[in-house]
Amino acid sequence: MAEIDLFEAMRTCRTVRRLRPDPVPDALLHRVLTAATWAPSGGNRQPWRFLVVRDPGRKRQLQELYLPLWQRFSEAYGARMLALAPEARAQTERMLRAADHLAHHFHEAPVVLVVCVHVPDLAITDAGLDRPPVVGGASIYPAVQNLVLACRAVGLGAALTTLLCMKEPEVSALLGIPKSWATCAHLPIGFPRGKGHGPLVRKPVEKVTYLDQWERPLFAP
Ligand SMILES: Cc1cc2nc3c(=O)[nH]c(=O)nc-3n(C[C@H](O)[C@H](O)[C@H](O)COP(=O)(O)O)c2cc1C
């Protein structure tokens, strides 16, 4: 397979929610998981474990936990969508359709990857502030993004999901995950059904970058 430029991979690294059931060879999984382990982490503690779920019964149980969470979440989304401009609404509707497909077919992905982090090893430097801490995630989600980009590079589709984290006790019991490990993401992975990857829709950099002071633009619009 031809190598892909890093910027091109990032620009087209869509969430791929429609996957073929064809198996993902171990060698390919090894390659993308190796890329995940190249990620940085606080103190280089590398507090991750990657649990590859291939067993049909376990994948089915994950899907049965996921579907009602998605249905509740999508109802709330539907209400918010009414306020959107037509183009944004059409995009959101496409995303919701794809996400709904994923929720019904979660277990058909050849691999569901459960990403776990060892909580005692997290460097949570913002734990004392008057808001929920966010820094701990920086020791695990770069690994997830490395993995997703590596999937893009080798032609695999992946969908980063976090809804199932709400059901951590059930997921941990199902997969034998010890108490000190948190579940951070569940990624159905497989070869895309159809095109899969493609250009992303994002806010322009001009809108989200400031110089020296909040809301003072660095780049002209
Ligand atoms: C932290 C996080 C959690 C997400 N959780 C879910 C999820 O539970 N289910 C889902 O279908 N997509 C999930 N997504 C995918 C986002 O919906 C997706 O990244 C976003 O709509 C942008 O679409 P794109 O990645 O195709 O550009 C999640 C993404 C992130 C970064």
Image (cartoon, rainbow, N blue to C red):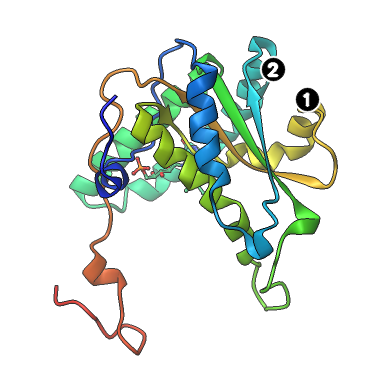
How many residues crowd around disc 2 within 10 Å: few (fewer than 14), some, or many (20 or more)? some
Question: Looking at this rendering, what residue extends furthest in the left direction?
Answer: 221
Q: Position of residue 216 (x, y in %)?
A: 27, 86
Q: Is residue 11 left or right of residue 36?
A: left
- The amino acid marked with disc number 1 is Leu
Q: Quadrant of residue 93?
A: top left
| Residue in the image at 63% along x and 26% along y | 52
- The amino acid marked with disc number 2 is Arg
Q: Is residue 170 left or right of residue 8?
A: right
How many residues crowd around disc 1 within 10 Å: few (fewer than 14), some, or many (20 or more)? few
* Tags 1 and 2 touching, CB below 8 Å: yes
Q: Position of residue 149 (x, y in %)?
A: 40, 41
| Residue in the image at 25% along x and 29% along y | 2
Work out whether residue 59 can be spotted.
Answer: yes
Question: Pointer 2: what residue?
Answer: 58
Q: Quadrant of residue 122?
A: bottom right
Q: Earlier in the sequence, mark 1 or mark 2?
A: 2
Q: Is residue 167 above or below residue 101?
A: below
The quarter of the rendering in which ligand 1 is drawn is top left
Question: Pointer 1: what residue?
Answer: 174
Q: Position of residue 157 (x, y in %)?
A: 40, 28
Q: 83 or 103: nearer the eye?
A: 103
| Residue in the image at 62% along x and 57% along y | 139
Q: Is mark 1 within 8 Å of ligand 1?
A: no
Work out whether residue 106 can be spotted.
Answer: no
